[in-house]
Image: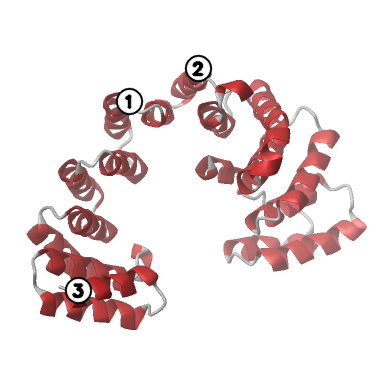
Amino acid sequence: MKKFLFLFLCPLLLFSQSSLDEVESLFKNKQFKKAENVIINYLKTYQNNLKAIELLGDAYGHQKKWDEAIANYKKLVEANQQNANYHYKYGGALGMKALENKFKAIGLIGDIKSSFLKAADLDQNHIEARWALVELYMQLPGIFGGSKSKSLHFAQELENLSKVDGYLAKGYVYEYDKQPELAEKYYKMAIKEGGSLVCFDKLTKLYETEKEPQKAIKNIEEAQEKHQRNALHYQIGKVAAEYNVELQKGEQCLQTYLKNHSPEDGVPKAWAHYRLAQIHMHQKNKTEALKYINLAIAELPKIKPFKQEKEKILNM
């Protein structure tokens, strides 16, 4: 549920008051504590400003201060019962608290569900609320109202609004329900309809879960052909290294990733060196494996899997 619940943290940054002008840049720079302080000071003068209250809730949410976020979103709901996004954010904050505190989760389920349902009812085009309901009904045990049929109902509503979202939602439902063939079908439909990296990534992860690495590599190659992203070279190398398949291709892709690496790629070079060490270990090439794992450790010395891999290599 985390992925879609975090969508409610997208901040509203259109404030007319000059005292809040800096909040936009603070959010962009992920300086959420500073933003929190700015908004709190603003609310000392304009305590009923709903935009400021919402943004304060967002600032708390980004810091995982769920109780504070809940309190602010609750103020919004009480101030305007007809605002779908207020209900969605309130339910989202409750949901995140439930994920972090299983002892309190049972007591929160009713409010979480009713908040998302209210948001979906108030706004027939609210995609995020429907995504949250798809996930919620699949993850809840039946005794607490979990229902595959209800998940599929909201997945169909998503499809009516956005075919890609609908196909991804149905793929999620069937993957969660251990029906990989149907999940694959809908993820492929999402790729055909939209073709975003998100669509390709969903199918790749399904193949990895189902221990089908060669299908995963083929899918990543198709994503690379369409999107031309260096990060996808790492993904191919990762799958090759983890599953001991297509090792030559994996090595070539990792070397390409290292050659063209930039901070935008996301994965540090150390992880590519780690994967190269794995590949050479599969090939029984101890010298090369040791070289690459030492490079990985030199770059990120605190990563436990790197140290564990080195022990395996030394014991070859």
153 w.r.t. 30: above or below: above
Near-viewer residue (139 or 29): 139
On residue 138, the disc is: none
Near-viewer residue (127 or 92): 92
Judged from this view, the residue extending furthest toward the bottom is: 298
253 w.r.t. 115: above or below: below
Q: Earlier in the sequence, mark 3 or mark 2?
A: 2
Report the residue marked by disc 1: 179
Which x, y percent locates residue 271? 30, 68
The Cα–Cα distance between marks 2 and 1, rounded to whole angstroms, is 17 Å
Q: Quarter of the image for the C terminus: give it.
A: bottom left
216 w.r.t. 287: above or below: above
Where, by quadrant of the figure, is residue 143 drawn?
top right
Which x, y percent locates residue 286? 12, 76
Which x, y percent locates residue 115? 70, 30
On residue 153, the disc is: 2
Q: How is the image coloured?
A: secondary structure
Q: Please, what secondary structure does the residue beneath circle 3 have?
A: helix
Q: Amino acid at mark 1?
A: Gln
Report the residue marked by disc 3: 313
Where, by quadrant of the figure, is residue 208 drawn?
top left
Q: Amino acid at mark 2?
A: His
Q: Please, what secondary structure does the residue beneath circle 2 have?
A: helix
Kindly identify the residue that appears in the image at 48 percent across and 20 percent down. 148
Count residues near mark 1 (Cα–Cα under 10 Å), then give few for <14, some for 14-19, many for 20+. Answer: few
Residue 312 shows in this picture: yes
Kindly identify the residue that appears in the image at 8 percent across and 61 percent down. 248
Q: Is residue 273 left or right of residue 158?
A: left
Q: Is residue 91 left or right of residue 283?
A: right
Q: Amino acid at mark 3?
A: Ile
Q: Is residue 251 left or right of residue 203?
A: left
Q: Earlier in the sequence, mark 2 or mark 1?
A: 2
